[in-house]
Image (spheres, rainbow, N blue to C red):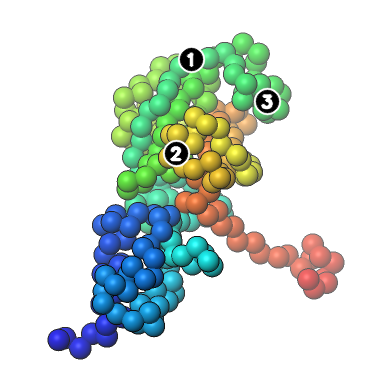
Amino acid sequence: MDGTPLYKEIYQDICERIKDGTYPENSALPAERVLCSMYHVSRSTLRHALDELYRNGFIVKAHGNGNFVKSKVFDQKLTKFHSFAGSLKAQHILIKNQVVDYELIDMDKYLDSVDLVRQSCPPNTTWHKLVRLRSVETFPLMIETSYLPQGRFMTFDVDILRDGSLYSYLETYFNMEITDASEVLSPLIPSNKERVLLQIPSHLPCMLCERFCHERNTLVAIHRTVVRGDKFKFKAAYYVDDSSLGGGKL
């Protein structure tokens, strides 16, 4: 014996089963009585191991419904301009792209609903519409629909974007330089097609991220991104200027 407490051995074994996919994300662990029989331990020893798994973020406990493997969540800071792929790469996470659809369009339902498009773009504008499914590790993370005016980007090589960054492509081949951008976040109930692509159940909500990118006051890119609600957290930091509060305290 190596002196490792029994509950630690159980903890380590379940950790390995979670990491290798034996117990997938969001799946229920076997019932406690089954685990006790599997490891030949008492209920108290098993619960010690489960408590350790919970404290270290491997499982979540649903009272009366058992223990579930916790979904891995990625952080996205909103304090500066970012790309999803770039921010994940900084966390040593590789994102993969699958081109779902590409077409040249004059208008669609989404563009027609965007006030900024109606206000700043000529009515005869033609758009590249690129839809990509973006995945991390073994699961899809987001569906990104990008709209780019053909007047600024005449040709479009979809094959390059199967493995590369859209921003890098536009910067390299078109000398694009984003000078400012705005972003709108809102909750979203995904469509049936979006649920299928993201491989999520009907009860799971998503986050809609809409980004509008400008190049010296000209709208050059719109991104409508549907992000899995169980996979992403958006974070922002704020600094309070006391002068804006009239010198008062919150």
Estimate the x, y position of residue 38 in percent, counting from the top left.
26, 70
* Rendered location of residue 71, percent (x, y): 43, 56
Cα–Cα span, label 2 and label 1: 24 Å
Q: Which mark is residue 198?
A: 2
The answer to which of 133 and 2 lies nearer the viewer is: 2
Q: Secondary structure at mark 1?
A: strand
Identity of the residue drawn at 71% across and 65% down: 240
Q: Residue at x 64, y 43 (%)?
A: 186
Which residue lies under the disc numbered 3?
113
Residue 180 shows up from this direction: no
Describe residue 12's horizontal placement relative to residue 231 as left or right: left
Q: Residue furthest bottom?
A: 3
- Please name the amino acid that badge 3 sits on: Ser
Q: Which residue is mark 1?
A: 104
Q: Quadrant of residue 245?
A: bottom right
Tag 2 near tag 3, CB within 8 Å: no
Q: Amino acid at mark 2?
A: Leu
